[in-house]
Amino acid sequence: MNGWSSFRALFGLFVDTARTTFRIGGFVVAGVLAVVVAWRLGTQPTEDATQRAADVADVIGISFLAPLASLIFGTAMFGDLADDDTLVYLWLRPTPRYLISAAAHSAALVASLPAVVVSIAAVQIALGSPLGIILATVGATAAATVAATSVFVALGLITKRALVWGIAYVLIVEQFLARGGSGLGSISIRSASMSIIAHFTDSESAVAWFGPWRSMAMLIVVSVVARAVTVWALRHREVA
Amino acid sequence: MSGAVTAIAGAPMVSLVNVSRRYGNVVACSEVSVDIGPGVTALLGPNGAGKSTLLRLCCGLTRPSEGVVRIHGHDPRSERRVNRFVSIVPQHQRLFPRMTALRFVALAGTLGQVDDPVAAARASLTAVDLDPEDRRTMEHYSNGMRQRVKIAQALVTGPSIIVADEPLNGLDPRQRSSMIATLRGLGEQGRAVIISSHVLDEVERFDSRVLVMAQGRLAAEGSVSGIRDLMDDRPHRIRIVADHADRLGASLLVESLVREVILSDERTIDVATDDVATLARRLAPSASRLGVVVEEIRPLDDDLDSVFRYLIERR
């Protein structure tokens, strides 16, 4: 009972922390832009609408909206508290570290997941994609968002300037290493997510290296490891 | 929660044994050994003396590079449940800006496993003269109000150890008196209240045990009156500006009123004396006898920093 009360209190705090006009406004602008671009693309003739839907899911959803929302809201969870030294008010309490971690990850997901899911669904609808494609791209993008948000929550705790590190991660791992075949690609959220889309839409992708089950397992492992890193860092970090 | 930690019988409330803390090449705290028990204990020292580091070590926010820290006999870094004994009032004024004070203090109570956090938060806020029903968020609070909110969140869990870093910062005189009374009262209840300050007069009002820190080391320990005696007993340096300062300096040496004279220029001497009162009484007659016109007399080290320097050099 006490654990649940602590979780609820922490969850509310983290949601409040992440919810700024700048962050929400910034993502709304990005989402609207994405829908406008998709709508313009949808008016262009194409020979392979499925492939176009998969490409748009990759470029706009998994490579842009998912990392953007995850980065903005994920790094804010502990990053804001560490930056202004208010983390001490949570840390110096007998609260289990896994509860603090769970509250932060949950709050980050509550902020990032609906934003991405609604945006990517709107993008695919604007593109004129059939329901099966919409479900596949939304599902895969949601899974990518869960994994990326987990990574960025942990990054916000273990690094200073987490936004910079996060952008570096996206550019190096998700854009560069993801193209490196099934070896290097196995550490890429984008690669796993696009593999799922490629499988369920019967489309092609330059970063789709894996089967659907392995891809799902990769995303789950990334999320679990990121949460474990968060708990470890909370136990061992020094607090100002 | 299962596995609740209990205080080990006979163990000091806070114990530091040969504790050092380094940040790279900087030694913030060096070989500090001290036990802290009930009552108010003040860490006194100039800025950069290592007070904040020592406070953070005391509650486990920082791990020692060397040495052992114990709270009620437990290691605060490895035994998280020890945190139920400790609350901190940080030096910074930052709080969660979009929360009300009641919600913030209730959050502290919830995380501290208080049975009725909201009722406890109301009581804590009332104890520090804040209105629990104030619906403004804390971004609208003055520094004084924020300071009191910080105290309230520390009190809400009923800790046996309260660590307060410069707790009187940002308070007006009336609030200072109230805060001092509150912290003294907590000490009289049997809690260990550890505060830091760089102002001796401020510490004096707590009527506390004083640990003097300088350059990361524990330089002295005792009562405020003992520290006052140290200030009086140490050699004092005084600057005298006069039209024939060299002649005056020589005369003061001959009369054994000073132990050292440094001629800065033709009109300025810096003297060191163990007996300021006698020098003050006999300086004017000496100058008059020599026909020297004294233009300025100024103490060079009549502040706490000079006491800290003296204590360190003496060790």
Image (cartoon, helix red, strand yellow):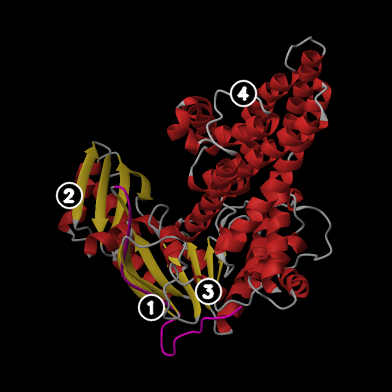
Q: Residue B111: x percent and y percent? A: 65, 68
Q: Which residues are magenta?
A: B1-24
> Around disc 2, counting alpha carbons within 10 Å, would you say few (fewer than 14), some (14 to 19), or many (20 or more)?
some
Q: Earlier in the sequence, mark 2 or mark 1?
A: 1
Mark whose residue sits in front, 3 or 2: 3
Mark 3 to mark 2: distance in Å?
Answer: 67 Å
Indicate which disc, 1 or 3, sits on the residue closer to the N terminus.
1
Q: Which residue is mark 2?
A: B250
Element type at mark 2: helix
Residue indicated by mark 1: B35
- Tag in front: 1 or 3: 3
**Residues at circles 2 and 1 in contact by the CB criterion of under 8 Å:** no
Quickly name the residue at label 3.
B81
Asked which secondary structure carries label 1, the reply is strand
Specify the label residue A204 is tagged with.
4
Q: Quadrant of the N terminus of chain B?
A: bottom right
Q: Can residue B174 be seen?
A: no
Q: Please say if B191 is above or below A230.
A: below
